[in-house]
């Protein structure tokens, strides 16, 4: 990044090259607080002028009511300091200049000096037009320092003060007393005016940074929502392709069995009942899978290409993985010791788990172990597969209700991935994988339990109901 020249740095610091406008009503209720601030300073200005008059610091020839009126007039414009910051600055410093030329003791009171400081600060901090702000503030500073220079040139107050203290006869320092007094006055005024400008500009820059951070947060939130939506769409399309393969298999089975039944009807009607029963079972399962697919993809948009997702391609695909492929996931030699167990009731029930359910359970284990390896300090984990096709109340209660069109639930299939580690610092993921996992569970009307365990570690458990008729 090239270094900026001093004029460019000043323009950037004052915001001359930006379109940011600070909202005068930010935070809410700011106008009401300005009114209370202005009224409070009016009261303080009147009280301060009376204190100064009673202490003999003001001209005795000025009537008390005029002193109070002029003091209140100086503080009153601050009630609209955020609505019209540049106008308030111009009015306040015109008040200072007029009184400084006519009744110079009044604008030198402490409260009015604070009023002029707040007016300059407000102009820099709240002006919407930064170029106009630079012009107005520059003119005010020029007038103020010109007036100060004129007062020092024609006034004799410093000379009288030095003589009254005996400083001219016995100087206490290395500098000439008059020179030191002039330098002191200039330093105080520079700190006064430049301090108000600096504080006001810091406030304006802070407001601009807050707006930029708010916009960035909104952008990140929108991008995160878009990434989640795309992940959901991608996973739904992957589910659609996988279910397409399974449904295509059942349609092929129906066609073959229908041909066999047609040939057997004329020769042996009793024997033809077996292929017809197979057709009935396959058609029911195909309808069930298609209903789940439609429910899952009902609100899917058309943002993806014709190839159907990241895997893309319309060529031949091999059958999707199932329960028999889960042990291969646990056998990876990457420093994580994974224990695998399979519980099937009755024995062999795992072989009858429908392909879509088996695929979803496989993906669950895949996602769970991937999260352990990426985001956990665990060195050991366990994967448990449970399949229960026993008839009776226990089996029916184990599932989460029957799948639409399947005639009720006939048990459940479940996987559980456990680990005993803690979240690895700085490794938080996007959560998109878990979103896709929940989408799969919803497609099968199942139940998912995902989250940290009370005893430590993390649990990913998914239970899917099984249809009445085995695949």
Image (spheres, rainbow, N blue to C red):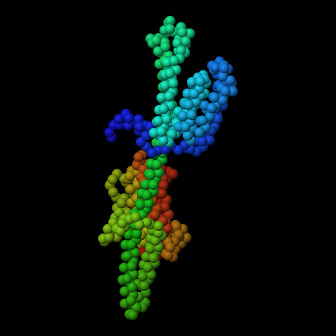
Say which of 35 and 103 sits in front.
Answer: 103
Judged left or right of residue 211, residue 238 is left
Q: Quadrant of residue 258?
A: bottom left
Question: Can residue 270 be seen at all in this image of the molecule?
Answer: yes
Q: Residue furthest bottom?
A: 266
- Give the quarter of the figure containing the N terminus: top left
Up the image or down, 467 lies above or below 66; here it is below
The residue sitting at 34% across, 58% down in the picture is: 331
The residue sitting at 44% across, 66% down in the picture is: 300
Question: Can residue 108 be seen at all in this image of the molecule?
Answer: no
Q: Residue furthest left?
A: 315
The residue sitting at 36% across, 59% down in the picture is: 330
Query: x, y (%) of residue 435?
Result: 45, 59
- Give the quarter of the figure containing the C terminus: bottom left
Query: x, y (%) of residue 78?
Result: 59, 35
Query: x, y (%) of residue 186?
Result: 48, 22
Say which of 87 and 404 sits in front.
Answer: 87
Query: x, y (%) of residue 436?
Result: 43, 61
Q: How many marks?
A: 0
Q: Residue furthest top?
A: 169
Say which of 341 and 202 sits in front.
Answer: 202
Up the image or down, 14 lies above or below 214; here it is above
The residue sitting at 38% across, 80% down in the picture is: 253
């Amino acid at each position: 990044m090239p270094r900026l020249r001093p004029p460019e740095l000043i323009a950037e610091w004052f915001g001359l090259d930006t379109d940011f406008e600070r909202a005068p009503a930010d935070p809410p209720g700011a106008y009401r607080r300005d009114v209370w601030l202005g009224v409070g300073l009016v009261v303080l200005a009147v009280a301060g002028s009376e204190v100064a008059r009673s202490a003999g610091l003001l001209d005795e020839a000025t009537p008390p009511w005029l002193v109070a009126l002029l003091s209140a007039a100086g503080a009153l414009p601050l009630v609209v300091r955020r609505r019209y910051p540049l106008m308030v600055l111009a009015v306040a410093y015109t008040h200072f200049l007029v009184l400084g030329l006519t009744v110079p003791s009044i604008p030198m009171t402490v409260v009015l000096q604070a009023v002029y400081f707040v007016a300059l600060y407000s102009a820099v901090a709240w002006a919407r037009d930064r170029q106009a702000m630079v012009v107005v503030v520059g003119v005010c500073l020029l007038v103020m320092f010109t007036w100060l220079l004129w007062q020092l040139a024609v006034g004799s107050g410093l000379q009288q003060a030095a003589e009254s203290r005996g400083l001219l006869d016995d100087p206490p320092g290395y500098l000439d007393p008059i020179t030191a007094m002039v330098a002191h006055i200039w330093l105080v005024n520079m700190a006064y005016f430049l301090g108000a400008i600096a504080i006001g500009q810091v406030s304006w820059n802070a407001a601009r940074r807050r707006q930029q951070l708010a916009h960035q947060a909104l952008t990140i939130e929108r991008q995160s929502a878009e990434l989640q939506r795309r992940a959901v769409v991608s996973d739904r399309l992957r589910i659609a392709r996988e279910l397409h393969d399974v449904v295509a298999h059942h349609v092929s089975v129906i066609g073959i069995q229908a041909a066999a039944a047609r040939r057997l009807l004329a020769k042996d009607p009793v024997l033809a009942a077996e292929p017809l029963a197979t057709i009935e079972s396959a058609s029911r399962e195909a309808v069930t899978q298609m209903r789940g697919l439609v429910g899952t993809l009902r609100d899917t948009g058309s943002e993806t290409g014709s190839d159907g997702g990241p895997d893309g391609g319309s060529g031949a695909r091999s059958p999707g993985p199932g329960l028999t492929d889960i042990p291969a996931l646990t056998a990876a030699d990457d420093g994580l010791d994974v224990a695998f167990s399979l519980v099937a009731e009755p024995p062999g029930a795992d072989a009858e788990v429908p392909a879509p359910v088996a695929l979803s359970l496989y993906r669950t284990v895949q996602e769970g172990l991937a999260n352990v390896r990426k985001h956990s300090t665990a060195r050991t984990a366990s994967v448990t597969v449970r399949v229960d096709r026993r008839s009776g109340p226990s089996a029916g209660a184990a599932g989460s209700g029957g799948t639409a069109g399947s005639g009720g639930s006939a048990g459940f299939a479940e996987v559980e991935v456990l680990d005993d580690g803690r979240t690895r610092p700085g490794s938080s993921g996007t959560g998109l994988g878990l979103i896709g996992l929940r989408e799969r569970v919803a497609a099968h009307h199942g139940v998912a339990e995902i989250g940290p365990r009370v005893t430590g570690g993390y649990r990913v458990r998914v239970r899917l109901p099984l249809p009445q008729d085995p695949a």
